[in-house]
Amino acid sequence: LANKKFHPEPSIVTVGNVEIGGKDLVIMSGPCAVESHDQVLETAIAIKKAGAKILRGGAYKPRTSPYSFQGLEEEGLRYMKEAREATGLPVICEVTSLEAIESAVKYVDMLQIGARNMQNFYLLKEVGKTGLPVLLKRGLSATIEEWLNASEYIMAEGNRNVVLCERGIRTFETATRNTLDISAVPVIKEKSHLPIIVDPSHATGVRNYVKPLAKSAVAVGADGLMIETHPNPATALSDGPQSLTFPQFEELCEELRPFAALM
Ligand code: PEP
Ligand code: MN
């Protein structure tokens, strides 16, 4: 179902009033984790002004350590929905369990399957059954073939609204959190009709590398970007070091404008 051989035209996935895979570059942005009503609302207003089209924010956080902040769960989903009502931006949240899916469908416009769950086939089938658009992140050590097979699990349930997200893979390099596999974009474009976006925030883990890699993603033909932003990254409950401030995010959007239609 994901194979371009049987579906040569590029697919467009619609999230609220936003088309991913069309001629505009779609930027999703927001905090790693939803922390409070005000944090999410303030972020939504700032990123919308800069040119972002979708608000992201995690309410269920799959943290490496069980002692790290795990997310506000349903309360966080509610804040995301309130931010959508205030700004009109569609919202995306990661889901990590069946209970999370059951809650999220009441609040969000797009579901995210995180890197750590890319091969959680049970979860893939369950998001497939919802019919909501799904952002499928590439697994930490997944090949492109495995990633596309994961997308098949969602589509085989009758849900064709899948967008892929390259977010860096594990390599021997330690200067960055992961290694952005920029070649995944042209490889996916050759093999599949599905839209693909790039997440330079999780790929690098370092704020200063986000802008250059975002530009590289646009240069190789990505359909969108996912960029973590925070009103005050120093106090973020997760992924502060890779989060952009609002002025930095605005600057990034401005610098992308000559190369991509943002609105
Ligand atoms: C996230 O988007 O906040 C996240 C946890 O990303 P990943 O699954 O790519 O690590
Ligand atoms: Mn994060």
Image (cartoon, rainbow, N blue to C red):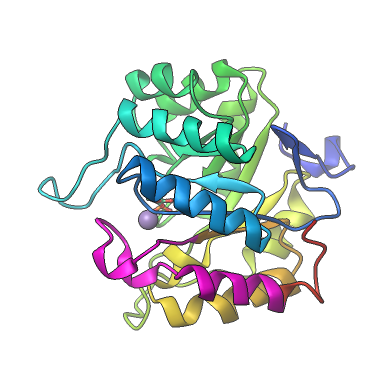
Q: Is residue 103 above or below residue 24?
A: above
Query: At 84% across and 41% down in the image, what residue appears?
Result: 5
232 sits to left or right of 228: left
- Please state the quadrant of the image where ligand 2 appears: bottom left
Q: Is residue 159 above or below residue 28?
A: above
Residue placed at 35% from the left, 32% from the top? 96
Residue pictured at 80% horizontal, 67% vertical: 260
- Would residue 216 be visible to someone looking at this image? yes
Is residue 237 toward the left or the right of residue 110 in the image?
left
The residue at 52%/67% (across/down) is 200
Q: Quadrant of the C terminus?
A: bottom right
Check residue 232 for magenta coloring: yes
Residue 95 shows in the view: no
235 left or right of 119?
Answer: left
Q: Nearer the viewer, residue 135 or 158?
A: 135
In this rendering, the count of numbered labels is 0
Residue 121: x %, y % from top left: 43, 29
When asked about the image quadrant of residue 251, the answer is bottom right
- Residue 223, position as x, y percentages in the image: 73, 56
Q: Is residue 196 magenta?
A: no
Question: Eyeballing the image, is 80 above or below 30?
Answer: above
Residue projecting furthest to the right: 9
State the image quarter where residue 15 is shown: top right
Which quadrant would residue 75 be assigned to in this image?
top left
Q: Is residue 125 above or below residue 51?
A: above
Range shown magenta: 228-255
Q: Residue furthest left?
A: 67
Location of the N terminus by quadrant is: top right
Instruction: Work out whether residue 17 or residue 2 is closer to the camera in this orientation and state it.
Output: 17
x then y, percent, for residue 163: 64, 42
